[in-house]
Amino acid sequence: MSIFTRFSDIISSNINSMLDRAEDPEKMIRLMIREMEDTLVEIKASCAGTMAQMAKSKREKTELQDKLDRWTERAELAVSRGKEDLAREALVEKRAIQNRIDVVDEEDNRLQEVVDQYKKDISELEAKLEQARNKHKVLVQRHVRAQKSHQAQSNVRKYNNKAAMMKFDKFEQRIERMEADADLVNYGVKKDLDEQFSAIETDDEIENELKALKEKQSPNPTQD
């Protein structure tokens, strides 16, 4: 699936607007990024090829300049020796080389313009690609948050329904029953101890009261 039909479509595209109209924004942004990356690779390859042509052209120009200098020297040598015909032929060769140099210069200028345009396109495309990647990162984060929020809401509904509350109530009643059973066990032991100590205290009171009665009824030996 192709989102863009040409490079200019990528540069002029409004990513936010395209995503707003998309049924699956995250899928579309991934496709956009992939197509931008592929286009960027193609442009860089073309730029590298053009720069290679420029390097070759510069080497040719250097070689032509050496030949031009050599034919200039030969023409001067022929003139100094009075060989005008030979000098004329040297000048003809020199002019042909100069014409070739002029052609190479024009080609270099044209190639330089192409390279400059490629570099501009690469810069613009990289900026657009960075924008798309940042947008994808935001979409992924929003997707994760939405999933977590959905899960949280699902859990709230899950534990907020009548069946779940009944389970909690039954569990609470079970705990209360266990606590009551524990209190009853402790209460029985405590009551038994209280009764034993109460009996001892009661026995002591009765014995003391009985002793007092005996003392009261016994005759006083000092009265005889």
Image (tube, rainbow, N blue to C red):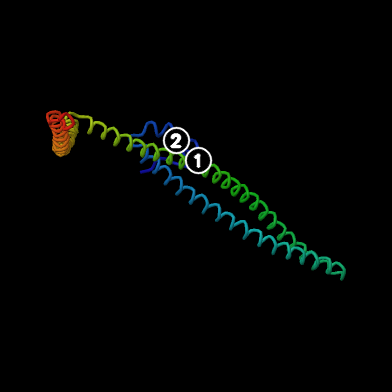
Residue 15, numbered label: 2
Relative to 120, does residue 169 appear above or below in the rendering? above
Q: Is residue 175 left or right of residue 139?
A: left
**Local crowd at mark 2 within 10 Å, few (<14), some, or many (≥20)?**
some
Q: Nearer the viewer, residue 45 or 34?
A: 34
Q: In this orientation, which residue lies closer to the viewer: 69 or 129?
A: 129
Q: Give the class, few, some or many, for how many residues have Cα within 10 Å of label 1's Cα (few <14, many ≥20).
A: many
Residue 128's disc number: 1
Element class at badge 2? helix
- For this rendering, which residue is in front, 177 or 31? 177
Q: Amino acid at mark 2?
A: Ile
Residue 10: give x, y in percent of width and height. 47, 39
Label whose residue precedes the other's in the sequence (2 or 1):
2
Quadrant location, the C terminus: top left
Residue 155 position, x and y percent, is 26, 35
Q: Is residue 88 left or right of residue 171?
A: right
Give the percent coordinates (x, y) of residue 157.
24, 31
Res. 55 image quadrant: bottom right
198 is higher (above) or lower (below) than 73: above
Residue plotted at (65% across, 53% down) = 108
Tag 2 near tag 1, CB within 8 Å: yes
Q: Is residue 215 visible?
A: yes
For residue 141, side relative to residue 214 (left or right) = right
Image quarter hosting the N terminus: top left
Residue plotted at (66% across, 59% down):
58
Which amino acid, by three-letter code, is at mark 1? Lys
Q: Label 1: state its secondary structure.
A: helix
